[in-house]
């Protein structure tokens, strides 16, 4: 279990093989804007972050998952991947770049998964790529760069 005052990352009894991915403070965007998320490692360099259910609060006027929700989930997923794969603390890290291609509409009432892998890690940067999926349905693909937290002074 990792609980550093900011994040809670522990086995989720409702989803065996998955761990929680949430902020200790429930009033922040991740909790209020996105909702319940779980994460698991996949392979040597990858992780899967799941929004347990894309609900009506995540929808646009076309009754599909809003693109802004998809982008926010990608951003959170990159940090979760960095933590799960590299053991890097996400607190203090920032997104430097995010490139996204929407491919299909996300469906309401289903889990929404970010499937990401670390492509390269340097002393200060982490390069991530991945897809957004709902079962066999491809919603988006992305590439992004994170800057690791600065060393304490």
Image (cartoon, grey):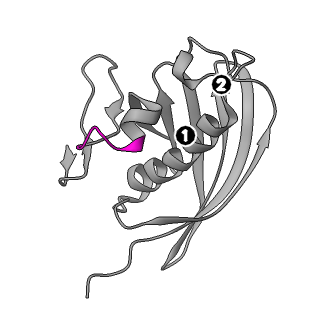
On whether residue 25 falls in the magenta region, the answer is: yes
Image location (x, y in percent) of residue 52: 45, 22
Q: Along the line of sight, which residue is nearer the eye, 54 or 14?
A: 54
Give the quarter of the image for residue 143.
bottom right
Residue in view at x 37 percent, y 62 percent: 88
Residue 144 in view here: yes
Tell me where residue 37 sits by quadrant.
Answer: top left
First-in-chain label (2 vs 1): 2
> Is residue 54 in view from this perspective?
no
Magenta stretch encompasses residue 82:
no
Report helix, strand or loop for mark 1.
Answer: helix
Residue at the image position 71 percent from the left and 48 percent from the top: 142
Q: Which mark is residue 73?
A: 1
Q: Quadrant of residue 151?
A: bottom left
The picture places residue 123, in percent across and down from the top left corner, at 48, 80
Bounds of the magenta segment = 24-29
């Amino acid at each position: 279990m990792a609980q550093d005052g900011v994040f809670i990352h522990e086995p989720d009894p409702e989803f065996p093989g998955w761990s929680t991915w949430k902020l200790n403070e429930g009033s922040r965007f991740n909790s209020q804007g996105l909702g319940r998320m779980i994460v698991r490692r996949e392979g040597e360099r990858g992780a899967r972050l799941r929004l347990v259910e894309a609900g009506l609060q995540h929808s646009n006027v076309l009754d599909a998952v809003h693109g802004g929700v998809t982008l926010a989930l990608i951003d959170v997923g990159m940090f979760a991947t960095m933590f799960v794969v590299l053991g890097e603390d996400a607190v203090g890290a920032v997104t430097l770049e995010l490139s996204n291609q929407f491919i299909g509409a996300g469906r309401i009432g289903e889990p929404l998964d970010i499937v990401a892998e670390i492509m390269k890690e340097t002393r200060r940067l982490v390069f991530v790529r991945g897809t957004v999926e709902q079962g066999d349905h491809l919603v988006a693909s992305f590439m992004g760069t994170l800057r690791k937290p600065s060393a304490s002074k």
